Image: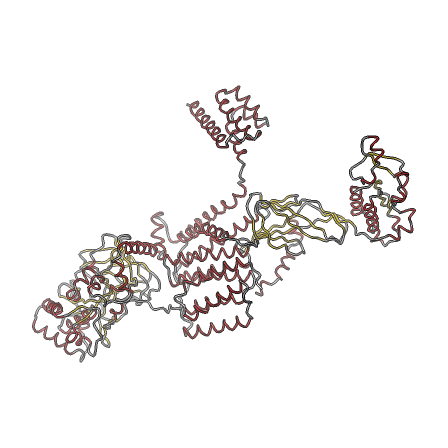
Amino acid sequence: MWWLSTKWSQRAEKFRTKRFKSWLDRRVPPAQAIRLSHRNIFIVPTRQGFGFVLILLLILIAGINYQNALAHALAFLMLGLFLVAMLQTHRNLAGLVLSQTVPVEGFVGQKISVAFQVQSDAGRVHDGLSFFWPNARVVQGFGVDRNGTTIYRQTTPEQRGWHAPGRIRLETVYPFGLFRAWSWLDFDCKILSYPKPVPCDHLVSQNDSELGAGRRSSLGTDDVKAVRDFQDGDDQRNIHWRASAKLDRLMVKSYESQLSASQWLRLEAMRELPMADRLGGLVYLIEAASQRGDAFGLDLNGQQLPVASGPGQEREALKRLALFDWPGL
Amino acid sequence: MMMVQRPALLWMLASQSLMLAPHGSRMPLWMLIGCFVIVAFTLARIQGHVRLPSKWVAVASVFLGWGLLWREYGSPMVVEFWVDLLLFMYTAKLLELVSKRDVAQVMLLSFFVAMTHFLFDESMLQTIVTFSGLVMVMATLIAVHSSSTQTLGRQPLKLASFAFLQAVPLLVILFVFFPRLSPFWTIPLEKGTAVTGLSDRLMLGDIHSLVQSDALAFRVNFAAAPPASRDLYWRTLVLSEISEGGWVVGSPPRPKTAIGTPAEVIDYELLSQPMRVPFIPSLDRILSVEGASVSLDPLGFVRSTSVLQTVSQYQMRSGLNPVDGVDLSKAERAAYLALPKRTNPLAQAHGAALAENHQAPDARIQAVLAWYFDDFTYTLNPGASEGDSIDHFLFETRRGFCEHFAASFTWIMRAAGIPARVVLGYQGGAYNPSGNYIEVRQFDAHAWSEVWVQGEGWRRVDPTAFVAPERIEAGMGASAAGMDGLMTGKAWDYFQMQSLGWLFDLQLQLQALSHLWDRVVVNYDQAQQLRWLTTVWPDLELEDLAPLALAAFLLGLGVITVGFVASPFRRRLSQEARWYRGYVNCLDGEARDQISRGAGVARCQEVWRLTRPAEAALACEFVDRFELRLYQNDQSVVPSSISKTLLVLRVRLAWMRLTKKR
């Protein structure tokens, strides 16, 4: 049908101007977990719903013109069903609780999967739900039973830094398709995207003395100058077993004093790379160092992250790179 | 390739078949077969045996269907043409059905199809069938929109029935209160199906075909006890003129004065089925009638402005044995004596001879009736009439039916100089004790005469009563039983049924129910609406109806909405929480302060023991059990025992408070 073309949805898209968005922000504020209720559910009849009303009116007119009592009754029944459909469609969304379970990180240009937990707080079964993400494919049809459901959403960040996932549209036309109930949900969750790694092995070989994150060969046990207490995130390979046995607690080798110069990953060292790739180069080196289990420190134009190793260090370094604020970067 | 789940499609086919079925017996055979083929084909398609036909097959079949329908009805001015067209499109849609939206459209159309059911049948059974079909339609919509991929079982049906139950209160409210409007425009469409019933002329042999039908004519509820069957003469048409060998209504002169005061007045409510002619039966001499578009004819019968298409209800008042104390005017006298010349000469001569032999009009009447009694036979199988039909009957066959007797009697009367006319209507009717009403069927159709007697007015003379008294005394069934095999068709089955005791009783009950349905539901119009509502609100005006309807509707909607919206908020508390809440409610005074300040139950018990030791002992028992169950997970403590102790505690507290107040 021509009047049902997609133009309307485009117009509707335009209609959601800034003003509407700010109203929406007040009406449905961002939150960690969102419970759907009459406050944040919108509902309008679908095309079929309007068709239903049209048929209802035709039947009523026929009933009046033929003075047919049962046609009257049929029209009234349809009106009742229409309103019940509205309430039931609303009820199909109401009582759902959505929450984001795990914080999400990833690299620019890489697919990230965001998981949302959908549960029914009334212990009811909700059917025929679908899930939209702005400018993305529809996650068609899923139901929520008493145990809840997890829905996933793939996204590919295009810039480093924090990303708000944007509003999610959860909608349903269940049970009768006469009404569409939906909610625009804004999660207080964020996606952190790290710069895309840019391979820069040539830089390492050229400026080995300055940049080279220490290699295993140069980290012989003999070079150990100090030991320190084991911390979460330390590489198991760096545990100083002899010292641990002696002191009866886990100790790790500390290379800091000897290798500090070469362990520092500095932004200045990336001068040869184009502006846009400099942070990516550092990411590449951090990834490489973490893979090897090496300790490293990060120096971003004077903002320093002390030398350490392990996943904690890697994440912290990547996070700093993701959020590093410097003109031109 | 179907984009809809299989269970949903099966639901769709089932509900569609159910919606088509009531039209099955009415629609042309080719169309019935066509619909069946399309449904079967779609079933095969769902099962994966065949594929979607090309677009051209669908287009061709639609054009073929249109053409055949046009050939069938020949005119677009018949309701059946449009209904069948709708049904055809409704079915042919299956040939191009692919998406969910297609299924939804077909299902929405089902509601329109449901409306067409009621154009042809407004019975209770039809309503039940149609509404069940609509439950299936709603179940289909549920199945279509469900995201479940497994078979859904009966779940959609359950949910749809639930939705129906919620919608029905609104239906009832609107049905009762919604103002009934008069038609916006007159519908030019006529129903093409023939209705059995009296015609507006009396040709010999007409009624004979009617008595083979057991179709319902009308039902009557009397305000008081109904009169005996032999007194029930339902006058429908007064035939005053002879035209082309048959009696017709004609246009007799207006009577000089109104009917005299009747000896006895009787009130009744008549519910008429669709009729062939725009005349409504009424008892004896009708005095007043209330109902849609009817008027009293001066000759004393009820005219309707149009032929009844639906069941219609009338409030009537009739006078029994009225006395018309006035003379006939000259014009009237001439009209009621007029006979066409040169037809039925023997009958005319017989009438003239009668006038010579007997002076008093009464004597002439009696002489003819006596002749009928002696020489004539009442039969349902009188044979064909030839030539001058009255002469043929009077002087050759002498075997006839009520129409023969009435027509010939009136003819002789006129020939003998007594003003006379034929009355067409129904005689008798079966009393239904379950519903306390009289039911008249088409086989009760009857014809009799009215003759003018000076000083008395129009007197009813039923020659059939003299020939076959049992017809009048006991009704059609008795006379038919005496003439085994002569009566054929449905009417015969109907009388056979009477011999099956319990089955007949059951039938009576069902008929009473159907009558109630017709009176209360099918005939719920503006007049009845006012009559009903004024019994509750005596001051109700017609204009108040719309706001009242709106208010009642909103009230109903509010109740349903609260039921829906409130339920998600009314979260169910766990049993433990309810016990705790019950305990807290028992507290008062200082103990309550303690617990509201966050003190534990133990501290609370302590306070209680100090202030009111007697009650605390009871509370202690509850607290012990509660703790055993909850914290020590002691399975020997049954939940019901905890509830019981709490109940005892609360009853005891309530009792103490009550006695203390005294």
Colour logic = secondary structure
Q: Is residue B478 above or below residue A323?
A: below
Q: Quadrant of the C terminus of chain B?
A: top left
Choose between B85 and B661: the one closer to the eye. Answer: B85
Between residue B294 and residue A123, name the one nearer to us: A123
Occupied quadrant, residue B206? bottom left
Q: Position of residue B278 (x, y in %)?
A: 30, 66
Quarter of the picture holding the N terminus of chain B: bottom right
Image position, residue B240 (x, y; %): 22, 70
Q: Is residue B121 visible?
A: yes
In the image, B68 versus A312, the foreground residue is A312
Number of marks present in the image shown: 0
Image position, residue B71 (x, y; %) = 42, 75
Q: Quadrant of residue B658?
A: top left
Point 64% across, 43% down: residue: A33
Q: Is residue B322 left or right of residue B85?
A: left
- The residue drawn where x is 86% and y is 37% is A254
